[in-house]
């Protein structure tokens, strides 16, 4: 996960940005289809240094009313995050453990809300 949802700078137009790693983006498409998730192809240009940019393929879909952009970086991209267009530093990414912790705390929050209703 990366972007405004991770940093906490959320606006009405914010969306969830997932950075996935595979040398075969079509594998991600197949997983989405297996789970019945309708998607659109998308792509985003990222800068790695002052001279190198890369066009990253991805898939845009909606889950529980939230827009999600799942961008598929090559496996070697796991070690080198692209630069933020705001501060020119590597984009901060959350690893799987942090995402699972966020989801767990969200689930606990939802259960507590239901108990109070």
Image (cartoon, rainbow, N blue to C red):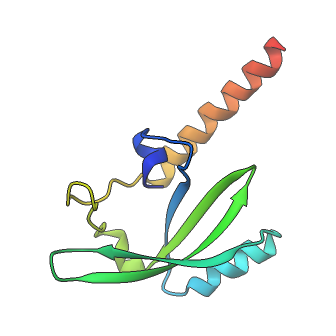
Q: In which quarter of the image is residue 76?
A: bottom left
Q: In which quarter of the image is residue 2?
A: bottom left
Query: In the image, is residue 97 above or below residue 54?
Result: above
Query: In the image, is residue 113 above or below residue 8?
Result: above
Q: Residue 106's x, y, as percent? A: 64, 33
Q: Quadrant of residue 77?
A: bottom left
- Residue closest to the eye, 99 or 85: 85
Residue at image location 50% in from the left, 42% down from the top: 11
Residue at image location 27% in from the left, 74% down from the top: 47
Residue at image location 21% in from the left, 54% down from the top: 87
Residue at image location 55% in from the left, 39% down from the top: 102
71 left or right of 93? right
- Residue closest to the eye, 116 or 79: 116
Total numbered circles: 0
Q: Residue 113's x, y, as percent? A: 75, 20
Q: Which quarter of the rendered picture does the C terminus lie within?
A: top right
> Outermost residue, left direction?
50
68 left or right of 30? left
> Outermost residue, front direction?
12
Q: Residue 31's x, y, as percent? A: 71, 75
Query: In the image, is residue 23 above or below residue 49?
Result: below
Q: Residue 46's x, y, as percent? A: 34, 74
35 left or right of 94? right
């Amino acid at each position: 996960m990366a972007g405004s949802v991770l940093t906490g700078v959320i606006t009405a137009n914010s969306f969830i940005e997932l950075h996935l790693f595979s040398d075969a983006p079509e594998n991600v498409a197949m997983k989405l289809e297996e789970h019945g998730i309708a998607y659109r192809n998308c792509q985003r240009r990222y800068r790695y240094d002052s001279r190198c940019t890369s066009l990253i393929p991805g898939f845009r879909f909606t889950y529980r009313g939230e827009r999600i952009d799942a961008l598929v970086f090559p496996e070697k991209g796991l070690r080198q995050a692209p630069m933020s267009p705001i501060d020119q530093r590597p984009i901060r990414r959350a690893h799987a453990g942090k995402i699972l912790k966020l989801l767990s705390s969200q689930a606990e929050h939802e259960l507590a809300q239901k108990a109070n209703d």
